[in-house]
Amino acid sequence: MRIWLCLGMTILLLAGCGTNSRTASPSPQDQNNTGGFRTQSTTENVEQMNTGGTMTAEQRQIHLEELAQRVPGVNGAHCIIMGKTAIVGIDVDAQLERARVGSIKYSVAEALRKDPQGAGAVVTADIDINQRLVEIGNKIREGHPVSGFATELADMIGRIVPQLPSDTVPRTKDQTGNQKNDSMEIAPGGNNQDSEHLSEQPRG
């Protein structure tokens, strides 16, 4: 009888040890898993901080293109960053009247002005300039430095009367009651014209 009792107790002890071993063994794994989750969370936080911090030129380019494309009437947008200046070309319906195109350009400029990254952006709907922006953008993505196109981009800005985001702020009048900067009409359908029409105007 004692032999059977001893055997039973031995079996129970062995079974208990096995249970404890199985219960205890996952603990280091759980700790490692927990540490892994913490590391992943920290990495995600770092990435979020980088995204929320200062944008790179490429990030700013994509951001401004997305802002422009949200404006009704804009079929597409192409942006080139040159220093603190951004040239944003927008695709609109070719059948639209000139006044409607001017209104869309104004809306895009206003949307950019309200965004911290949009200050200093130049907006144009000129088809030829827009196509050239696409070509330059492709060259930059291939590894060509944007500085190689600095002269051409500066010429683009000089050829157009830009719709600047900062110009959507209501203007003040001088003492004579005349509005300042009359050559930069910002109202929809105003005097904003693209380069192909500027060449016909005499320069004063």
Image (cartoon, rainbow, N blue to C red):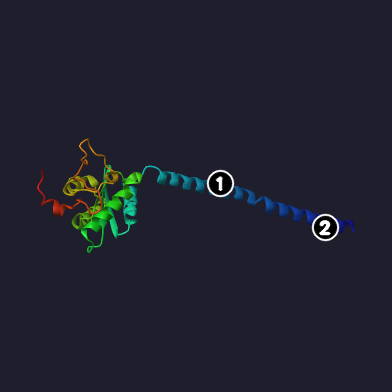
Type of residue at label 2?
Gly
Spatial CA span between label 1 and label 2:
42 Å
The x and y percentages for residue 116 are 35, 44
According to the picture, the residue beneath numbered tag 1 turns out to be 35
Residue at image point 89% right, 56% down: 2
- Furthest toward the bottom, the residue is 95
| Depth check, front residue: 201 or 45 | 201
The x and y percentages for residue 33 are 57, 50
Q: Is residue 99 shown to the viewer in this render?
A: yes
Q: Which mark is residue 132?
A: none
Position of 137 with respect to 4 (left or right) is left
- Furthest toward the right, the residue is 1
Residue at image point 18% right, 57% down: 128
Position of 112 with respect to 18 (left or right) is left
According to the picture, the residue beneath numbered tag 2 turns out to be 8
- The mark that comes first in sequence, 1 or 2, is 2
Type of residue at label 1?
Gly
The x and y percentages for residue 16 are 75, 54
Density class for disc 2 (Cα within 10 Å; few <14, some 14-19, many ≥20) is few
Identify the element where label 2 is drawn.
helix
| Depth check, front residue: 140 or 16 | 140
Density class for disc 1 (Cα within 10 Å; few <14, some 14-19, many ≥20) is few
The x and y percentages for residue 187 are 25, 50
Q: Is residue 91 above or below residue 116?
A: below
| Depth check, front residue: 95 or 43 | 95
The quadrant in which the C terminus is found is top left
- Furthest toward the top, the residue is 175
The quadrant in which the N terminus is found is bottom right
| Depth check, front residue: 26 or 142 | 142
Marks 1 and 2: CB-CB under 8 Å?
A: no
Identify the element where label 1 is drawn.
helix
